[in-house]
Amino acid sequence: MLAVVLCLSLFTISSDAALTGKTVTIRHNIDVSGFLQTEHLITSGFTPGIGTFDIDDAQTSNYRIRDYWRNFSNAGHVLKSINIASNGQIVTVNIPLYELTAADLLSVELANTENGLGLTGTNFRVVAGYLSIGVGIGMQNVKASDDVTVTFMWEDDTEPNHTFTAAASANGTINSQFMENTGDAAVYRLQAAPDANYMLDYWECTEGSGTYGNGAVFDSSTNNKIEAPDDYLYIDTLAVTLTENSAFKAHFKPAKIILLDGVAICPYEADWEDAVSISGSGDVGINSPVRVGNRAQLSFRFKTPGGLSDTVNGVNVGVELYKGASAESGDKFFSGSFGSTSLDSSGGNLYFVVHVPSMQQMDGFAAVVTLNGGEAVSRYYPLESGLIVDDVLEAERARAQTGLDAVLEYCKASQNYASVKRLVGITYASAAETIKTAETAEEITAAVNDAIRLMTALISGASEQGIITVAVSVDKLTVSGEYIVEPTLMRLPAGTNGMNVLLALLETFYPEVEEPYRLKGGYLEGIWDPAYTNESGSYKYPGYLSEFDESAGAGWMYSVNNVFPGVGAGAYVLADGDVMRWRYTGGQNSNGVGLQDTANKDALTRKVAEINSAGTQGSYGAKYAAAMSALQKYTASQSEVNAALAAFYPTDMGGRDIHSGYGGTVVLSDEKGNYTVTATAAGYVINAIWVDGVKLADTSGKTTYTTKTAPVKSIFASFIYAPGG
């Protein structure tokens, strides 16, 4: 069935425009009470139905017959014309809706014309169109020299001279509407109704002959196809005049999105009332420069075939924006997608809003859009007078930098600042760089807030997300069996590299030395060690233990979790729980001893670092002494190191909580309360498991074990290094 649409505004008559005593009478030439109901009318200022109305009393004057073709032609009545009578004259306006296409609108102005009606003013017109839902009259600011009578002229419908048949069509259907007979021919309007996510491709005459609405002759073998444009907005129609019984088939294809004119652009935080509309029609652009900030928002208006019915749910729109006239420029500055929840509908249109975080200077841009992953369509939006990008972030940058500087001064005033100076400085510098380069206010705010949180956590020692803990040591075991810096725990901002960890450690332990290290570029040449001597008395840097001081192949290397990474420490980022050991190693010392220890000492290093950082060495007595002896003996065997570690874990666990030593995890594994113990560090195995203070048998040497009886009070597991099992 055919839907007729009227794009008619509501008209308001001002008090000074109306003439006292003049009336408008609405009537019909036949009795319409049987088919013209109140719900079929849209009126404003006129009482629905038929009657005489005083112009003075009309606040708005608008009389429309709603759903005209759909409701009344099928009821056996056809509206042929509207007669307007006034001042002794009659003007007839024919309503040839079957000749209108989706892009047409019949609008006949009756005021200010040479028709003798005596009507003057802004607007008195008859409007009918395929794009809306009715046909009617409207008045605005009209002066009349006499009363006005409007008569809607109806005729009885007739049987068509020729029949129309809709052939079966895949992915859609055809509806037909007989309009009128003209001579021996019959006029029909055809309506294509595609299924969801499809649109009309072309019409095909499969039987019969006649003429199209544009006068072109067709038959089933000649000129029998007519394509539908991709940019039709509603269900497409075709007017045909049949000279014999005929059949048509509609062919459908996957739907495309239809981009419309009038993209709105404005600064990100601005109201849409401040937006400027950008036309995409030909070479037409805006008349003055568009001023936006680094961030802008663009509202695109579009439709999908079939209007809004059943299109919002399930629709996914993909969009790419390119600087220049097309995607071929390759200068893409935005890419994103919008699902049903991101789309908005208003006034019969669909919208999606693009937030561009980094707007650029440009003379225009191309939008390339897809509907549900289908064929892309594009449209160019010229900015003839250019786009002005104001850096609205400058004030935000200045404000953020002021806040960051204030926190740095707070940190410097702390008594703990010297021990974390480098780490605080690294965090500060990273945030300061983000402030300079960030493209959005959100990036600036996030970077500064993170930096403030980490800087104050470093000063206070408080636990904080983004702060990790690692164990670090610096030794010269191969030279004298000693540490330069004994194992200690360090709290670092996540993302800190190994070189900064070492430098921060040395600056903390030797605050009186301006540079307790020697660097050449990013390479570590020496570490402050004034006690170091060698037999030759030759030193690369006096007061430092440096490369080549012991032999031609000697120097500083680092391991993380007992692995030498093979990259510079400045390129290695530590993770929470890592054990980093700096060792003077390689070649042979002056006594011909190899500069490399043989055991994995990471777990024992971590345990001693915990004790040292807590300052509880004295409470462990001989156990601590034995642990340091094993660590400082570069020829210590793995069994010696493991025995020193195991001594810290007594057989009676008492009421301890659930926890594990370095090298593995203890994780709840089932609803009964059992736990799975797993050695997670490379080369480590289970040393022992205690459940409620009782050591389990047959667990040593395994890489994983699940308890058979759930613990009541505690479970603890320790791990040892045992490569190869």
Image (cartoon, helix red, strand yellow):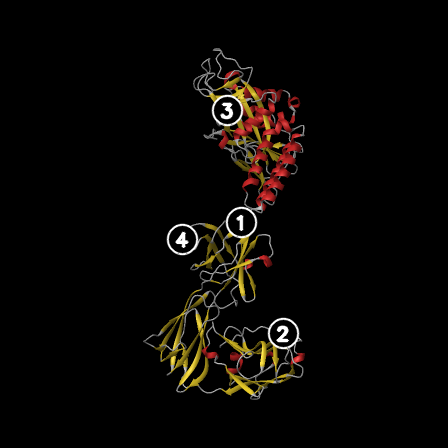
Residue at (59, 82) in percent of width and height:
37
Q: In 3D space, how far apart are the residues under numbered discs 2 and 1 (Cα atoms)?
A: 42 Å
Whether residue 650 appears in this view of the structure is no
Cα–Cα span, label 1 and label 4? 24 Å
Q: Residues within 10 Å of mark 4 (few under 14, many from 20)?
A: few
- Could you say which disc has been placed on residue 328 in the image? 4
Q: Which callout, 1 or 3, points to the residue nearer the camera?
A: 1
**Helix, strand or loop for disc 3:** strand
Q: Residue beneath label 3, please?
A: 519
Say whether residue 50 is left or right of residue 98.
right
Callout 2: 10 Å neighbours few (<14), some, many (20+)? some
Between 113 and 264, the residue placed more toward the observer is: 113
Mark 1 secondary-structure assignment: strand
Task: Say few, some or many: other residues with alpha carbon within 10 Å of mark 3 (under 14 / 14 to 19 / 20 or more).
Answer: few
The answer to which of marks 3 and 4 sits earlier in the sequence is 4
- The answer to whether the residues at label 2 and label 4 have Cβ atoms under 8 Å apart is no
Residues under numbered marks 2 and 3 in contact, where contact means CB atoms less than 8 Å apart: no
Which x, y percent locates residue 478?
50, 18
What residue sits right under mark 1 in the picture? 389
Residue 274 point in image, percent of width and height: 59, 57
Observer-nearest residue: 68 or 71? 68
Given residues 596 and 530, the one toward you in this image is 530
Identify the element where label 4 is drawn: helix
Q: Could you tell whether 54 is left or right of 538 in the image?
A: right
The residue to which callout 2 is attached is 12
First in residue order: circle 2 vs circle 3: 2
User: Label 2 vs label 3: CA separation?
Assistant: 84 Å
Q: Which of marks 1 and 3 is nearer the N terminus?
A: 1
Kind of residue at disc 1: Val
Q: Position of residue 521 (x, y in %)?
A: 48, 27
Task: Say which of marks 2 and 3 sits in front.
Answer: 2
Q: Can you say whether 193 is above or below 625 in the image?
A: below
